[in-house]
Image (spheres, rainbow, N blue to C red):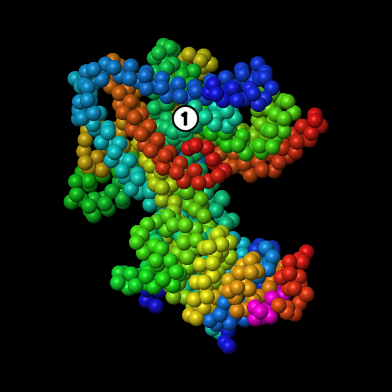
């Protein structure tokens, strides 16, 4: 019985250890959230959110231009990255049962985990240096778009794969051209999955810092021009994180709070969306089934 | 391709113009990714030409990075990357596997979903916020308790020399460990959950405890997936930039002591970008090229390892 | 004749589904008892309750008693781990550990108890594999992977693995359903040889198999025990009409 008790003990210890690992990993998460809220909240005010920074640390300035810059960067990135990502996903799912499809799928998987600073180098080499645009909004957006593409492509492929084959075949059998089948039937059914992917991609790039450092750089002015450098929340944090100026440091924490709210809202929203996805996609499927049968 | 088209046109009515246009446009989008990767390599080789011609292979073994003398070598940063990644993997892997075991084998069913989501939220926190947190919360803890303790314990080894300052390779390694946990934990969890129930039943029916079942039936069955997960985490640690840049102390020299500041390939680029010109810029891009090669190799290897168990899951299908 | 396993008012549930409804059954020692019945009648669940494997599944619950040699295995003092070493189990699909060799598969259970003496382990491997009628086929490839052999051999390997822990009873959950007729015949012969030493309970949906190997047969329907008795009696002169209908194939 001695070995038996030893085995029981080992079992209890191992279970406890596994639980301890989970708790240990949650500590930083909770700590970070608490810290960002506690140090960022005092900075919050209408002026702080709407005024631009002068970069000199004068009291009363804010992070308005950085918030605006981040929104602009992400908007342009989505404008470039989402269509390409979705089309890539369609290709891999609908036409990708060949060598090219396999290669594309593989490289998307690899790129999805690729260091973002290397992507930043690519956008730098391409837009800043080669096209000679210089540090700019558009260079930053291209970098973020490249990060978005594999995420969106992978989730689109997953979503389309979930669409029942019967639906695809049903539409094709009715003589609906393939491209319309994909665009109307398939995308309508995979919509929830694709939206999920798009939101996840947006959440991911909103917090990206290194590629922006290499491409969009920083500016303390309001700017709309695609060819000018632009401020962003992540870079506000990076530039000010060890600043001796209380005001600038406060800007870093305030920016961190705004950024983390943005990113976590998107992430938690996506998780809730995914939960209701199953229900919705069933409803959409029914809608298309009836529509197709009516046509027939 | 030609053969496929031939078959298709025989089976179906002649394709509409729209079909062709559509197929070629999605194919174009898909190949764009490949083109970008290819372009990246070409541009980087081109842009780092000056440095490559000047230093040759000596670049990789050169221990000096001195803009004043215009002499550049990447060894300190390769070294720093290896050391911080090593710390991260050493600390992150056991923790992550513990988490994965808890989530896949031990957690009550109602807790499993929410807890997995929370662990994945760790991955959603932007790197720069990890850096900010590390600077103001982790660093004091490191300086005041962790590092003096380790120094008193392991001060006789070359790894723990010098005074604790908190902005060093060890702190960077810790923050990296935290950051790679969600990657390793969630991919390992998937691998473990893909183990057929019959394997667990086999072990349990022999009188194995839950722990023994996990070791005997789950961990050994899922080992290639777990290994792949660790390599994926390693890949993330190699390329992670901001949090490291903000905590590693930024010293362009080689030192074995974890309590000394250092520099990784990624943090070097982030730190010197915008100021670098001429040969230094070229050398920075060459460092980026090395980082690219390492990350590519690590990620491809990890994908192949993870792919092996993914293949057994019918829903995922696909070649890889 | 003494009874090895006795259930008293045994109920089993999957979530809200009531799979086993108040079953009282006496499994005799050193005999083969077959449990037959249509798919989904709860026969697998019944034997899984006999070594506490039912509760492993999510949402599964058990009420009532299962006595092993007069001791309730569901009492709070009983550890399922110990119960399972006394009552071994073989599953529907062969499930050897793919990462272990044939040798390691057989001694997997013994290694749990910290047995490291290789002479002893060697002896157990040889004895168990001989009992499972597999020794002659694999004695030259003991280092090969547990899944490198044929399905029938894998199932016999699983039997050997279960026997190596020296259980008192052996539960077999449709052990031949994934096997071809030749492999099935081999396993049936093997059960016949084993019954002198072990109490055997076999779940099967193959009535000929029950008639061939079992000393006693239980017929279950919709989670209830309809009839239990000596095999010959159950097959040739059943008490219940339902049993007769099932056995003669005039069911439903």
- Name the residue tied to disc 1: A103
Q: Camera-side residue: C206 or A94?
A: C206
Q: Nearer the viewer, residue C110 or C175?
A: C175
Q: Is residue B283 above or below residue A189?
A: above
**Tag 1's secondary structure?**
helix
Residue segment shown in magenta? C223-235
A152 in magenta:
no
Q: Residue at x 79, y 33 (%)?
A: A293
* Residue drawn 51% across the image and 78% down it: C195
- Residue extending farthest front: C182
Q: Position of residue B179 (x, y in %)?
A: 41, 42
Residue in front for this viewpoint, B214 or C247: C247
* Residue C12 position in % (x across, y down): 65, 69
Is residue C233 found inside the magenta-colored segment of the image?
Answer: yes
Question: Based on the displayed image, in which of its 4 quarters is residue B316 positioned?
Answer: top right
Which quarter of the figure has residue A290? top right
Q: Is residue C1 left or right of B252 when viewed as pictured?
A: right
Residue B136 in picture, x, y percent from top left? 38, 41
Q: Residue at x 25, y 36 (%)?
A: B79
Left or right for B144, reference C199: left
* Residue at the image position 60 percent from the left and 73 percent from the top: C212
Task: Name the one closer to the observer, A1 or C210.
Answer: C210
Mark yes or no: residue C50 visible.
no
């Amino acid at each position: 019985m001695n070995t038996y008790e030893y085995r029981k003990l080992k079992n209890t210890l191992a279970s406890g250890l596994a639980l301890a690992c989970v708790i240990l990993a949650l500590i930083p998460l909770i700590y970070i959230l608490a810290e960002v809220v506690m140090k960022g909240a005092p900075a919050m005010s209408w002026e702080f959110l709407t005024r631009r920074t002068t970069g000199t640390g004068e009291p009363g300035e804010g992070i308005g231009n950085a918030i605006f810059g981040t929104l602009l960067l992400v908007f342009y990135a989505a404008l470039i990255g989402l269509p390409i990502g979705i089309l890539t996903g369609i290709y891999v799912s609908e036409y990708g049962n060949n060598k090219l499809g396999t290669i594309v799928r593989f490289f998307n998987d690899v790129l999805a985990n690729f260091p973002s600073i290397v992507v930043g180098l690519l956008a730098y080499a391409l837009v800043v240096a080669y096209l000679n645009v210089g540090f700019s909004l558009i260079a930053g957006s291209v970098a973020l778009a490249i990060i978005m593409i594999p995420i969106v492509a992978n989730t689109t492929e997953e979503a389309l794969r979930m669409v029942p084959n019967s639906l695809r075949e049903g539409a094709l059998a009715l003589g609906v051209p393939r491209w319309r089948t994909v665009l109307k039937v398939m995308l309508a059914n995979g919509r929830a999955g694709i939206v999920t992917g798009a939101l996840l991609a947006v959440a991911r790039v909103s917090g990206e810092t290194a590629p922006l450092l290499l491409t969009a750089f920083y500016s303390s002015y309001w700017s709309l021009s695609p060819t000018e450098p632009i401020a962003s929340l992540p870079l506000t944090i990076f530039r000010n994180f060890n600043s001796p100026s209380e005001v600038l440091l406060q800007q870093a924490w305030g920016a961190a709070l705004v950024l983390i709210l943005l990113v976590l809202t998107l992430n938690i929203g996506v998780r809730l969306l995914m939960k209701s996805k199953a229900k919705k996609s069933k409803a959409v499927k029914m809608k298309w089934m009836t529509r197709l049968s009516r046509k027939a | 391709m030609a053969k496929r088209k031939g078959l298709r046109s025989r089976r179906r009515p002649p394709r509409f113009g729209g079909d062709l246009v559509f197929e070629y446009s999605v194919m174009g989008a898909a190949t764009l990714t490949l083109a970008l990767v290819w372009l990246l390599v070409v541009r980087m080789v081109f842009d780092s030409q000056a440095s490559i011609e000047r230093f040759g292979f000596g670049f990789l073994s050169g221990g000096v990075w001195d803009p004043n003398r215009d002499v550049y070598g990447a060894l300190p940063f390769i070294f720093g990357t290896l050391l911080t990644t090593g710390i991260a993997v050493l600390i992150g892997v056991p923790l992550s596997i513990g988490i994965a075991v808890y989530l896949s084998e031990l957690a009550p069913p109602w807790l499993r979903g929410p807890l997995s989501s929370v662990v994945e939220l760790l991955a959603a926190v932007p790197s720069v916020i990890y850096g900010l947190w590390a600077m103001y919360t982790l660093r004091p803890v490191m300086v005041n308790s962790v590092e003096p303790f380790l120094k008193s314990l392991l001060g006789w080894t070359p790894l723990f020399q010098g005074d604790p300052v908190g902005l060093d390779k060890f702190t960077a390694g810790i923050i990296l460990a935290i950051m790679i946990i969600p990657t390793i934990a969630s991919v390992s969890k998937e691998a473990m959950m893909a183990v057929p129930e019959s394997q667990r039943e086999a072990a349990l029916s022999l009188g194995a405890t839950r722990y023994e079942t996990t070791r005997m039936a789950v961990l050994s069955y899922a080992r290639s997936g777990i290994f792949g997960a660790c390599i994926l985490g390693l890949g993330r640690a190699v390329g992670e930039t901001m949090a490291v840049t903000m905590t590693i102390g930024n010293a362009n020299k080689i030192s074995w002591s974890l309590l000394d500041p250092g520099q990784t390939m990624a943090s070097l680029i982030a730190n010197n970008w915008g100021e670098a010109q001429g040969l230094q810029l070229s050398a920075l891009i060459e460092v980026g090229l090395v980082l690219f090669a390492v990350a590519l190799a690590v990620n491809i290897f990890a994908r192949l390892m993870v792919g092996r168990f993914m293949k057994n899951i019918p829903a995922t299908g696909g070649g890889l | 004749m003494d009874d090895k396993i006795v259930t008293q008012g045994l109920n089993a549930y999957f979530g809200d589904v009531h799979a086993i409804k108040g079953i009282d059954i006496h499994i005799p020692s050193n005999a083969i008892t077959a449990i037959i019945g249509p798919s989904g009648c709860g026969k697998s669940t019944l034997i899984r309750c006999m070594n506490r494997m039912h509760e492993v599944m999510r949402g599964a619950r058990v009420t009532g008693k299962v006595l092993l040699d007069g001791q309730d295995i569901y009492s709070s003092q009983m550890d399922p781990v110990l119960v399972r070493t006394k009552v071994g189990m073989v599953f529907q699909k062969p499930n050897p550990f793919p990462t272990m060799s044939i040798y390691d598969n057989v001694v997997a259970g013994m290694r749990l108890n910290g047995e490291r003496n290789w002479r002893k382990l060697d002896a157990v491997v040889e004895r168990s594999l001989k009992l499972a009628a597999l020794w002659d086929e694999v004695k030259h490839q003991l280092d090969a992977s547990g899944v490198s052999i044929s399905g029938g051999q894998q199932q016999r390997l699983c039997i050997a693995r279960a026997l190596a822990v020296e259980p008192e009873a052996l539960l077999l959950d449709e052990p031949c359903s994934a096997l071809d007729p030749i492999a099935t015949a081999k396993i049936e012969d093997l059960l016949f040889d084993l019954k002198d030493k072990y109490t055997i309970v076999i779940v099967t949906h193959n009535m000929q198999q029950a008639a061939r190997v079992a000393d006693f047969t239980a017929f279950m329907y919709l989670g209830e025990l309809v009839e239990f008795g000596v095999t010959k009696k159950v097959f040739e002169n059943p008490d219940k009409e339902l049993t007769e209908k099932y056995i003669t194939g005039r069911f439903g």
